[in-house]
């Protein structure tokens, strides 16, 4: 069994906190609770997987805690669920309008709310935080593959699940590894990247193909689009566009957006 996910609740309404804690512990989460920003700044050293920022008096404390979290180099990427005060208590312990405009939370609800209804939201945020884009790197040059893999290794939301040296190798590994994205060169021996793209699109449509090539003429972009590719990046622009391109096509979007307009006509 894996380690229990840690959830930090910051809220000074003891009844709400206790009910929420019991609900989460029943779902096998480890729950940490605090009732002030000062306490939270100590408890967060336990490195929770998600923070639930509830109501803490006086007004402005929740916003101040939010700002501290989002500006902290170590904790800024922890998913944050804000639970705002009831309408009649906003002026006492809630979020004021100008504060709300600066909110960077991943989710927002307001009281009154049943703790049980927050569990699906927490589960979704945890899944999104731990989801990694699975990438297959396809190029017949080892140096190119090594460079791409080095860049992707720095991305916490990406994982290189395999490498392939030509289109035929890519097709086999896509069917076996089921990556989210196949990063594909065009000109390769045995089977070209364009032929592999056609086969992958037909046999494993859940894998999106992103073409990465030095042959970046418009006609090649149009042919790649026709073959079923979701994106096209010239190798000379790879350092600036690679990560954004992978994220975009993994979500089923064309990259760059203008790629959708490519046509062989």
Image (tube, helix red, strand yellow):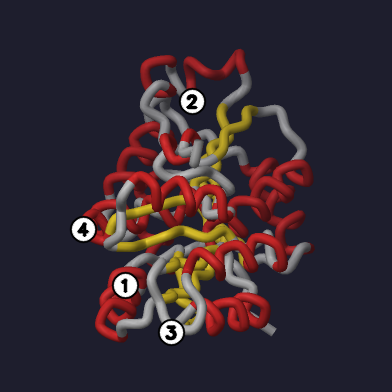
Q: Position of residue 115 (x, y in %)?
A: 73, 43
Q: Residue at x 29, y 70 (%)?
A: 151
Q: Name above or below for residue 36 compared with residue 144.
A: above
Q: Name the N-terminal-most of marks 1 and 3.
A: 1
Residue at numbered disc 1:
148
Considering the image in quadrants, where does the N terminus appear? bottom right
Q: Name the N-terminal-most of marks 2 and 3.
A: 2
Q: Position of residue 76 (x, y in %)?
A: 35, 51
Residue 62's label in the rendered image is none
Q: Name above or below for residue 226 compared with residue 1.
A: above
SS at badge 1: helix
Number of marks in picture? 4
In the depicted view, which residue is nearer to us: 32 or 220? Answer: 220
SS at badge 3: loop
* Separation of marks 4 and 1 at Cα, in angstroms: 13 Å
Residue at numbered disc 2:
93
Residue at numbered disc 4:
236
* Separation of marks 1 and 2 at Cα, in angstroms: 49 Å
SS at badge 2: helix
Left or right: where 105 falls relative to 15: left
Q: Name the N-terminal-most of marks 4 and 2.
A: 2
* Separation of marks 2 and 3 at Cα, in angstroms: 59 Å
Left or right: where 153 falls relative to 15: left
* Separation of marks 4 and 3 at Cα, in angstroms: 20 Å
Q: Quadrant of residue 239?
A: bottom left
Residue at numbered disc 3:
165
Is there CB contact under 8 Å for labels 4 and 2?
no
* Separation of marks 1 and 3 at Cα, in angstroms: 14 Å
């Amino acid at each position: 069994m894996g380690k229990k996910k840690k959830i930090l609740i910051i809220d000074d309404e003891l009844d709400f906190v206790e009910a929420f804690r019991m609900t989460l512990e029943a779902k096998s989460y480890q729950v940490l609770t605090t009732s002030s920003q000062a306490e939270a700044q100590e408890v967060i050293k336990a490195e929770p997987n998600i923070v639930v920022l509830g109501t803490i008096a006086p007004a402005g404390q929740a916003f101040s805690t939010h700002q501290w979290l989002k500006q902290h180099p170590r904790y800024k990427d922890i998913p944050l669920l804000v639970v705002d005060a009831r309408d009649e208590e906003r002026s006492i312990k809630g979020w004021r309008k100008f504060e709300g405009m600066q909110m960077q939370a991943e989710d927002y609800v307001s009281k009154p709310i049943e703790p049980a209804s927050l569990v699906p939201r927490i589960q979704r945020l945890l899944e999104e935080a731990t989801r990694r884009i699975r990438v297959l790197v396809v190029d017949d040059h080892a140096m190119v593959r090594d460079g791409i893999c080095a860049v992707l290794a720095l991305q916490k939301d990406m994982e290189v699940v395999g490498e392939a040296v030509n289109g035929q190798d890519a097709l086999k590994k896509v069917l076996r590894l089921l990556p989210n994205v196949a990063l594909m060169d065009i000109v390769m021996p045995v089977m070209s990247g364009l032929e592999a793209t056609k086969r992958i699109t037909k046999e494993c449509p859940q894998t999106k193909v992103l073409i990465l090539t030095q042959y970046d003429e418009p006609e090649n972009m149009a042919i790649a689009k026709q073959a079923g590719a979701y994106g096209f990046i010239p190798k000379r622009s790879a350092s600036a566009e690679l990560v954004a391109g992978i994220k975009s096509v993994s979500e089923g979007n064309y990259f760059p957006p203008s790629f959708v307009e490519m046509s062989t006509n």
